[in-house]
Image (cartoon, helix red, strand yellow):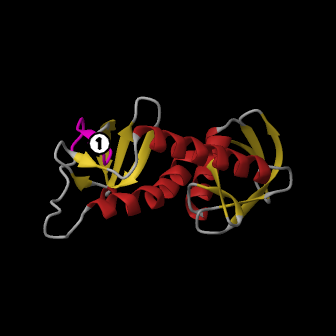
Amino acid sequence: MKKSLIAAALMGIVTVPATALAQDAAAAAAPELAVGTMVYDPQGGEVGSIEKIAGGNVVVFTGKNRATLGAASFVQGPNGPVIGMTKEQLDTAIEQAAAKADAAMAAALVPGAEVRSNDGVVVGSVQKIEGDNVFVDLAEEGAITLKKEHLTVDGNGLKLFMTAAQFQAAVSAATQASPS
């Protein structure tokens, strides 16, 4: 849940300053992005190392936090890839985004709240919350238990990380697998 929100928030924060580093398009070389490569700030300070690259996204580990940034957030510097934030600024941004995501989840995760699929279909409503378990009342299947980590929050409230069809298939499979 947090990772997708954090990644989305950070992509906007980091892209503009990093792009500003490229003083003219002709001089800006494509950044050399590879797992294990150190990422630097505009002053040449180490920010963290690249842990993973997938689908145009780059995961940078600062030693304290992980940030998923768009590949467009990087420019090539004299020592390697550069982003427009220092290690401290990136860590602060990650921690602030996580706190904001946690607060949004706490506000949305209440009994009676609708749970939607990621294609917008209401699949049930929150019955109760116990620790990391969220009991969701489904119209026909009864109640099921989800982990909080399977939910995120958007402008419409609680949302699953799957479509309604995928959710229904998972519920059906779990129902058939459990003893009657």
Image coordinates for residue 154, horizontal then vertical, percent:
65, 61
Question: Residue 117: percent from the left, percent from the top?
Answer: 63, 62
Name the quarter where the C terminus is drawn: top right
Q: Is residue 62 left or right of residue 110?
A: left
* Residue plotted at (20% across, 44% down): 80
Vertical order, 154 against 7 (above or below): below
Closer to the camera in the image, 9 or 21: 21
Q: Nearer the viewer, residue 139 or 51?
A: 51
Q: Is residue 84 above or below residue 22?
A: above
Say which residue appears at 69% left-offset and 35% top-offset: 179
Q: Using the rendered image of the protein, determine whether residue 136 is visible from the camera's viewpoint.
A: no
Q: Is residue 34 visible?
A: yes
| SS of the residue under disc 1 | strand
Residue farthest to the top, as pictured = 63
- Residue 133 in the image, given as x and y percentages of width and height: 73, 37
* Membership of 158 in magenta stretch: no
Magenta part, dominant SS: loop
Give the residue at mark 1: 40
User: Residue extending furthest front?
Assistant: 43
- The amino acid type found where label 1 is placed reads Tyr
At x 28%, y 42%, the residue is 39
Answer whether residue 38 is magenta in the image: yes
Is residue 40 depicted above or below 116 in this figure? Answer: above
Give coordinates of residue 29: x percent, y percent: 15, 60
> Does 142 sit left or right of 51 as displayed?
right
Residue found 46% across the figure and 30% down from its top: 64
Q: Estimate how packed mark 1 is, as few (under 14), some (14 to 19) or many (20 or more) residues with alpha carbons within 10 Å.
A: many
Compare residues 20 and 54 and report the one nearer the observer.
Answer: 20
Q: Give, as a single range, the part of the protein colored magenta.
A: 34-43
